[in-house]
Amino acid sequence: LFRSSQLNDASSADRNITIYVTNKLNQLEIKNINNKLVNKKGNGTCGEKCIWKIVSNQLIISGNGPMDDWHKTTERNPPWKFYGNSINKITIEYGITTIGNYAFGNCTNLTNIDLPDNLTTIGNYAFYRCTKLTNIELPNNVTNIGYGVFDYCTSLIFNIYDNAKYLGNETNKYLYLH
């Protein structure tokens, strides 16, 4: 079900998983040692009114409003964490207003991301260690970018002006300090 490299990247609590197949709906559920649902068939919720799904190595986020915030702890990892190494494209559809903290951190094969025009906030460390990400176009409505959003995005190409690194476009430039 998972490549060993995906499990090796997981925290120790997440590595201890049990796989259950329910007889009624024939759904695959993956739970950690605390019997907490870790993942369910490549889709689920990621905010009060937000859902996610994996389709051919693409993560698609849809719905309305803000995504949940995630953390580096084993209790609050994004639900797509086990797919992180295989995700190469992320599409966030119109309606999503906030990318949560740590949402896409360690998606090491991510090369392409589509952001909606109505996006206003990108949370802390949202793209942390997305090492193959080379370009990102920030929508004009983005007014809040958290701390360390692009830390260790070693392939990301910046616009250089007055010895500072910028991301964005001509009308909406954001200073990135590293």
Image (spheres, rainbow, N blue to C red):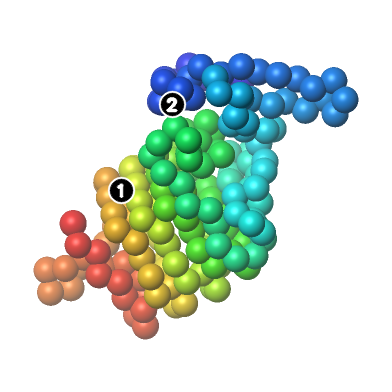
Question: Amino acid under label 2?
Answer: Ala
The circle drawn on residue 168 is: none
User: Which image quadrant: the C terminus?
Assistant: bottom left
Quadrant of the rendered image containing residue 74: top left
Position in image of residue 64 (x %, y %): 65, 65
Residue drawn at the location 41% of the way across and 44% of the way down:
71
SS for dot 1? loop
The circle drawn on residue 153 is: 1
Residue denoted by label 2: 10
> Horizontal placement of 143 versus 165: left or right?
right
Q: Is residue 133 something that shows in the picture?
A: no
Position in image of residue 146 (x %, y %): 34, 61
Q: Is residue 129 something that shows in the picture?
A: yes
37 or 85, which is in the foreground?
37
Q: Check disc 1: other Cα within 10 Å, few if <14, some if 14-19, many if 20+.
A: some
Q: Is the residue 80 above or below the residue 70 in the image?
A: above
Q: Is the residue 134 above or below the residue 6 in the image?
A: below
User: Which image quadrant: the N terminus?
Assistant: top right
Residue drawn at the location 18% of the way across and 73% of the way down:
161
> Horizontal placement of 132 versus 45: left or right?
left
Report how far apart the C-alphas of labels 2 and 1 lie in the structure.
20 Å
Q: Is the residue 17 above or below the residue 178 in the image?
A: above
The residue furthest left is 163
SS for dot 2? loop
Q: Earlier in the sequence, mark 2 or mark 1?
A: 2
52 or 77, which is in the foreground?
77
> Horizontal placement of 155 versus 104: left or right?
left
Residue drawn at the location 67% of the way across and 41% of the way down:
43
Q: Is the residue 47 above or below the residue 38 in the image?
A: below
28 or 16, which is in the foreground?
16
